[in-house]
RNA sequence: UGCGAGAUUGUGUAAGGGUAGCACGAGUGACUCUGACUCACUUUGUGAGGGUUCGAAUCCUUCUCUCGCAGCCA
């Protein structure tokens, strides 16, 4: 396998400049810092690939660090899943997994240092009062009346905050910066709040927790991060990031660089909304194959290679954009098409009876697992009198240039015989129920005189081996283009829209073991979905019907 | 008339004074025992106006539009 090199982007340009100026001694150290409050999704995958990929490109290091500074939202379930997902994507972090909570003591010391410098003070304003004092986007704020407390008093109060003498919300520690700053983040931001909550790692040791804006730069600095890559919404926080580093007197401070987060067409990417889908039980869980989560993609049969290629293909920039979902599918197809067997599948089965094939008779036909990759060998599929074909492959009255089955037409059953459509039967509802054909005995694939040329080749599965429902089939959470924007998805029509969209889904296969091996398949999706039984291997992709958009394991 | 950021074809992304390129998508054709794959060709693009220059997507200037920011979330 040749090593793909990560395409260059604007962040690499910045690093190149830093390397030229030597400001980090040509060292590159990045980090992926998720908050363990949900599962990773494809958007995080972009960040993961960027951070780990950039480190690798420059021979540097990348940390996996949990930004666990808010105990009320976080849980070990999430840290476990995140570790699993990052590993699955194929990245190796430097040293062990790190936690922001490991630095709580250091952060506390930094806060004390700020207090001593007169750069932080304990404030008694309520949350609401704080908001009023903060001013608005166009009007400056007012200094808190508590900003003038003495260093001694602040030190004492902060220590008592830590000791648990105060209730949640009673006091906060604020940075003493500038209430008139045009940047709201600089208007004496809260840097420590009281929260009598059990932390998933530090338990009840602390009842005060640092805010992101204070904690994050310290985390980066402590770990020796050089380039702290984050998303666009933190642009306005950079002055504060730099302020904390400067006032806490860290040497050779890291530099924050922002990029645009990934958005996919027709997809929900907000963690809040994904969590809602899980909590409301609209999906099976975070790893429901319809979810754009890494675990959902994994369960749907996506490969890490495909996800990585996708992340590299979409590029990195500062302009907000929505990537076409088709590109993700392209990357998956590209990775799967030569590596895995392709099997026949019919999505909406219609029984087809070969009237001149004796009842009770059957034979095995040999089909290449992958016509583009002979190394994948062949498999044998049972051919018999009754088979299922897909509803799309038959029309009573074909339009021009339709060269699949219709009365009077010849078509090849892939890997087997050419058949001639004689007749068909409809049920009371006017739906096609059965199709009657005859086969040409001499046309079996592989035989010398099999060369009868027909325009159409269709997929099929033997009727006797397409039984029991063992697989469920879905596709990604796909919203119709004209349907809704992300904003009104939840708010406007509530969850109904999601239910609607889920009904429109089309395809994943979940592993299901049957007695005696995995030799029978059926997919459910608005009814039925059959697959030919003889495909073996770790993974396979669908033939034409679902194309190569999905793969499955069995 | 707060601050910050962004704008290149249907979508995403390159080119940072010198032929606007690549990928996806879409379309046409060839091939084909998967209407797949593959191959070939095609595809209304530098937000607008002014300026500097032999030459501007790129530099200057004015404007327009879009996004983010008023959590004791991250």
Image (spheres, coloured by chain):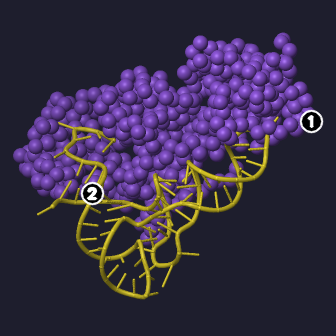
Chain colours: A purple, B yellow
In the picture, the quarter occupied by the C terminus of chain A is top right
Q: In which quarter of the image is residue A360?
A: top right
Foreground pick, A111 / A463: A463
Which chain is mark 1 on?
Answer: A
The image shows residue A165, relative to residue A143, as above or below, that is above
Residue A135 picture location, percent across and down:
12, 49
Foreground pick, A368 / A161: A368
CA gap, disc 1 and disc 2: 78 Å
Element under label 1?
A: loop
CA neighbours of label 2 inside 10 A, class few (<14), some (14 to 19), many (20+): some
Front tag of 1 and 2: 1
The image shows residue A426, relative to residue A413, as above or below, that is above
Residue A37 in view here: no
- Which mark is drawn over residue A239? 2
Which residue is under mark 1? A449
Residue A477 picture location, percent across and down:
47, 33
* Direction right: furthest residue: A448
């Amino acid at each position: 396998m040749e090593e793909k090199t990560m395409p260059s982007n604007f962040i690499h340009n910045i690093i190149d400049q830093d390397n030229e100026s030597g400001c980090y001694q040509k060292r590159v150290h990045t980090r992926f810092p998720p908050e363990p409050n949900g599962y990773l999704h494809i958007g995080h995958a972009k960040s993961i690939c960027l951070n780990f990929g950039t480190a690798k490109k420059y021979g540097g290091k990348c940390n996996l660090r949990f930004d666990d500074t808010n105990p009320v939202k976080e849980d070990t379930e999430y840290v476990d899943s995140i570790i699993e997902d990052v590993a699955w994507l194929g990245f190796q972090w430097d040293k062990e997994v790190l936690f922001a909570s490991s630095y709580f003591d250091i952060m506390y010391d930094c806060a004390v240092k700020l207090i001593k410098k007169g750069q932080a003070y304990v404030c008694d304003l309520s949350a609401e009062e704080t908001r009023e004092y903060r001013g608005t986007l166009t009007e400056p704020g007012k200094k808190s009346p508590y900003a003038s407390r003495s260093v001694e008093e602040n030190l004492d109060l902060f220590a008592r905050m830590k000791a648990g003498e105060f209730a949640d919300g009673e006091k906060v520690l604020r940075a003493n910066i500038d209430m008139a700053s045009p940047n709201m983040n600089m208007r004496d931001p809260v840097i420590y709040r009281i929260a009598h909550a059990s932390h998933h790692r530090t338990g009840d040791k602390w009842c005060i927790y640092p805010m992101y804006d204070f904690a994050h730069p310290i985390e980066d600095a402590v770990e020796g991060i050089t380039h702290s890559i984050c998303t666009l919404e933190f642009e306005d926080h950079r002055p504060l990031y730099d302020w904390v580093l400067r006032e806490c007197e860290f040497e050779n401070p890291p530099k924050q660089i922002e990029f645009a987060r990934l958005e996919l067409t027709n997809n929900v990417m907000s963690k809040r909304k994904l969590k809602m889908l899980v909590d409301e039980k609209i999906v099976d869980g975070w790893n429901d194959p319809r979810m754009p989560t890494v675990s959902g993609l994994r369960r749907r049969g996506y490969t890490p290679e495909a996800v990585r290629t996708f992340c590299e293909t979409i590029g990195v920039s500062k302009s907000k954009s929505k990537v076409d979902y088709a590109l993700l599918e392209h990357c998956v197809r590209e990775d799967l098409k030569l590596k895995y067997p392709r099997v026949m599948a019919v999505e909406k089965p219609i029984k087809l009876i070969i009237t001149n094939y004796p009842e009770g008779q059957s034979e095995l036909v040999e089909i290449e697992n992958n016509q583009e990759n002979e190394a994948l060998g062949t498999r044998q599929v049972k051919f018999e009198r009754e088979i299922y074909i897909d509803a799309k492959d038959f029309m009573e009255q074909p339009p021009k240039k339709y060269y699949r089955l219709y009365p009077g037409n010849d078509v090849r059953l892939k890997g087997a015989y050419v058949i001639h459509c004689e007749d068909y039967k409809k049920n009371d509802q006017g739906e096609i129920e059965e199709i009657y054909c005859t086969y040409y005995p001499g046309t079996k694939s592989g035989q010398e005189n099999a060369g009868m040329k027909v325009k159409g080749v269709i997929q099929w599965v033997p009727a006797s081996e397409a039984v029991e429902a063992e697989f469920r089939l879905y596709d990604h959470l796909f919203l119709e283009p004209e349907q809704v924007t992300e904003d009104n998805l939840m708010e406007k029509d509530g969850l109904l829209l999601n239910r609607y969209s889920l009904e429109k889904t089309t395809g994943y296969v979940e592993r299901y073991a049957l007695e005696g091996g995995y030799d029978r398949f059926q997919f459910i999706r608005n009814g039925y979905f059959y697959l030919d039984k003889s495909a073996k291997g770790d993974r396979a992709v669908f033939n034409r019907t679902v194309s190569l958009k999905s793969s499955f394991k069995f």
